[in-house]
Amino acid sequence: MALAMDGTTETGNDPDPPFGRPLFNDPKAKALKRVGAIDVGSNSVRMVVFDGAARSPAYFYNEKVMAGLGTGLSKTGRLHPEGRARALAALRRFALLAEGMNVSPLTCVATAAVRDAEDGPEFCEEVLRETGLKLWVASGTEEARLSAQGVFLGWPIAKGLMCDIGGSSMELAELGDGVVGRRVSSQLGPLKLMEIKGGMKARKKIIDSTVDDLREQIDGDYKYLFLVGGSWRAIARLDMERRGYPLKVLHEYRMTSKSILSTVKWISGKSVDELRAITGNSEARMRLVPIAAQVLKSLIQRFRPKYIATSSYGIREGLLYEQMPYELKRRDPLIEACRYDEAQNARLPGFGRTLYEFIKPLFKGSSEERWRLIKAACLLHDVSWRAHPDYRAEVCFDNATRANLGGLDHQGRIFLGVALLHRYKNSRDGTRFQELYDLLSERQLKDAETLGKAMRFGAMFSVQKRDLMGELTWHPKKRLLKLKLNPDTRALFGEVAEARFKSLANALEADTLVE
């Protein structure tokens, strides 16, 4: 099941669901155009300001301070004095920045450290007095719900188990059909686990015992485990480096249980400094990673997911998702982002739909996911026109593979990138992306090339009325590509257009017929 471009649910292999009406111009969406969220965690304090298409927002501003509020909490029961001072200084700065950016609303949430510390309420009062910011202290289960909603921002129909690890706690939540199910919170935060006496053996005993208890409370079967939190992202990045994985985009990076367990063992054999040298993470973050890796190993052994996916979206994105109207939540984040990009940057906004209708006959029988990528490519086909012509193809590939896009796995990113590269360039030989091409099969590469060359040809008929473009017909059994021109626009089929038509036919290994 997939989300249609109008936000409804697609079933079957319907190649032509309605494009619908973009929602980024809707008053309810415009109200979310610039939304701020501050997350006061046990290890870090971060402010994010979202801007743009509300369903798939851009990060207008993003700043983090590793304050370490929860350091020593297990021993003292209080927030760390230096961490408290650093957090307050960061919040003073964030309040002024938000005012200067005219951010409204600005939602501030505090999690495990402030929740558990005996001086947590006093800290909240100090923050309000010094900055004017009101901290909302989330319970453990509410923190789980918000983080799970952050996953839904990127995967509207995600199904499985979400695990969010912070400095002082770890939360689990069931995901399915856009709904957050059972939720539990635990004390398995690396900052707290670091303070356990008795070394690794004692820590392992507590971790395993706690995860056993969590398994009793959350007892379903989960094919997917979605990881949220900085320590998980650091482990995923280390998994990439250990495997030599070429696309360094953490969101939607997928791993198997076997791969993760190998990485956990690999991490245990390296020092914090060695790990930092590999990823460039801060010392404050990386010192928690070996402990978080122990927790992840225990989770995988007990919950036995088939796939593990990294989510860059968490509690802050969940705060944004919380404010969205239902219709907006059900939209496809990829398609909404592409529509917004086309409206803002294309030379002829709206032509993407016309182009899609023109090339659609070439892809009969495609899967739902393939139709989705074809639509996205058509919407994006012209948004990079301002780039220098010598580099336009590479810019298109980079934008597709590395952009902050939800609802797009890594193979989808590369497929989209190859298609857009061929929108501007006949051959991909000699480009610097070969190791990324290798993540696709030969069939996938061929299909992406065909899509790109179809868009390259279709762009020669830059007219908004579909009937003026003529009609493409593809006969795969006969290997015949037919073009029927409209008499009123036949002059558009000039020398360059003819050459691009032949290039498309070559990609299809087809003969041609022009009427």
Image (spheres, rainbow, N blue to C red):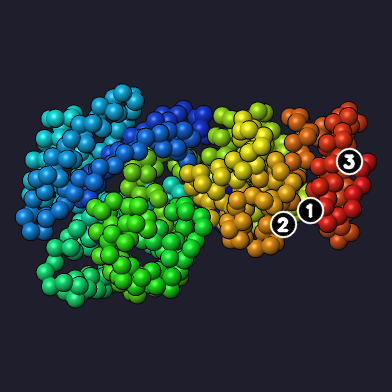
Question: x, y percentage for residue 289?
Answer: 29, 61
User: Which secondary structure, mark 2?
Assistant: helix
**Pointers 2 and 3 in contact (CB under 8 A)?**
no
Pointer 3: what residue? 484
Which of discs 2 and 3 lies nearer the camera? The answer is: 2
> Can residue 294 be seen at all in this image of the molecule?
yes
The image quadrant where one finds the N terminus is: bottom right
- Tag 1 or tag 2, which sits nearer the N-term? 2
Residue at 67 percent of width and 48 percent of height? 419
Pointer 1: what residue? 507
Dot 3 surroundings within 10 Å: few (below 14), some, or many (20 or more)? Answer: some
- Picture quadrant where residue 97 is located: top left
Identity, as a three-letter code, of the amino acid under mark 1: Ala
Residue in front for this viewpoint, 200 or 344? 200
Residue at 67 percent of width and 59 percent of height? 444
Pointer 2: what residue? 446
